Image (spheres, rainbow, N blue to C red):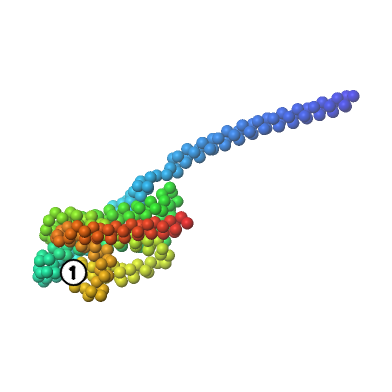
Amino acid sequence: MANGGTASGGATGSGTTGTTGTTGTTGTTGTTGTTGATGATARVEIGSRSAGRVVGSWRAAWLRVEAHWTWYRRYWRSSLYSSGLQPVLFLAAMGLGFGSQVEAGPATGGLAYVHYVAPALLVAGAVQNAIGESSYPVLSGFKWQQDYYAVTATPVTAGQLLGGQIIWIVLRVGIACVVYTLVALLFGAWLNAGALLVVPIGVFAAVACGVPIMAVAATTYNEGERFAAIFRFLVMPMILFSGTFFPIEQIPAAVRWLAWISPVWHGTELARGVTLGGLGGWPALGHLAFLGVLAGFSAALARRYFYRRLVV
């Protein structure tokens, strides 16, 4: 009987212990686990609000511009020649040096050669700067520095990154155009206040030429050999034979259409129209429409290629 009691008591004790242990463990574990999970969720939510907040499109684009500006304000002297001095030296050589041997006549609209060539050189210089900024520097963001991948790993999208690049080109080219305009004023290259409109025209033409090169850069996977061909066989002929130094009427009629499809020619006609006159309203709208369509179509194409390379 004693043994049975002990066994019964032991069984009862075991059962009590097991129930208590199970209840205590379940209660403690359940409460602690729920509390821990809730705390972790709260921390994740707080962290998401502080570190993963999606910024607006304009703000995201300007963050990229801020990165460019941080670099530029330290190394602007290295680009001083290409940005501002090269077009000025070209103006001095062609407008004053060579231009002193060119007599005013029908080809120049009866004006001195420096007045004829000054607005065209601003557009040509702006286009060259924009294409330079849109080629190897953009390819570097994809291939060498690969900072584009780091940017798009944040809430900044590939489209916003492209927008920042375009805004940066507008600012960079705009600064160069303002410098050129002020220095050309010292040469007596401007006849009226229409020179103030040459700056936005030059920037507009530069964007229309630079954005297509961004699309090309986004589809380039080698070392960028194609850019050398673009500079040699596209940019230089476009500068030389788009009415920069002489009217396109002097180009043989069989190849004159090449000048008509050149964005440099459209920009040059607009720049000369606001400074020298002689450009009607409808032709001006036609030039603006050509540059606008080229810039818009190229931006859509570049955006697609940026997403394809950085996201998909």
Say which quarter of the image contains residue 274: bottom left
Which residue is disc 1 drawn over? 247
Identity of the residue furthest to the front in this view: 282
Q: Kindly state the secondary structure of the residue where label 1 is placed.
A: loop
Q: Is residue 175 above or below residue 265?
A: above
Residue 194 sits in quarter: bottom left
Apparent side of residue 21 relative to residue 162 in the rendered image (left or right):
right
Q: Residue at x 31, y 59 (%)?
A: 293
Q: Tally the marks.
A: 1
Q: Nearer the viewer, residue 294 or 114?
A: 294
Q: Nearer the viewer, residue 304 or 281?
A: 281
Q: Quadrant for the N terminus, please.
A: top right
Where does the image place residue 294, in percent across and percent down from the top left?
31, 60
User: Do we see residue 79 in this rendering?
Assistant: no
Q: Position of residue 138 (x, y in %)?
A: 36, 59
Q: Residue at x 28, y 66 (%)?
A: 261
Q: Residue at x 18, y 69 (%)?
A: 247
From the viewer's perspective, is 169 left or right of 1? left
In x, y percent, where is residue 288?
25, 58
Q: Amino acid at mark 1?
A: Pro
Position of residue 205 in the picture relative to residue 141 (left or right)? left
Can you see residue 1? Answer: yes
Quarter of the rendering containing residue 15: top right
Determine crowd level at label 1: few under 14, some 14-19, many 20+ residues with C-alpha closer than 10 A. some
Q: Percent position (x, y) of residue 29? A: 64, 34
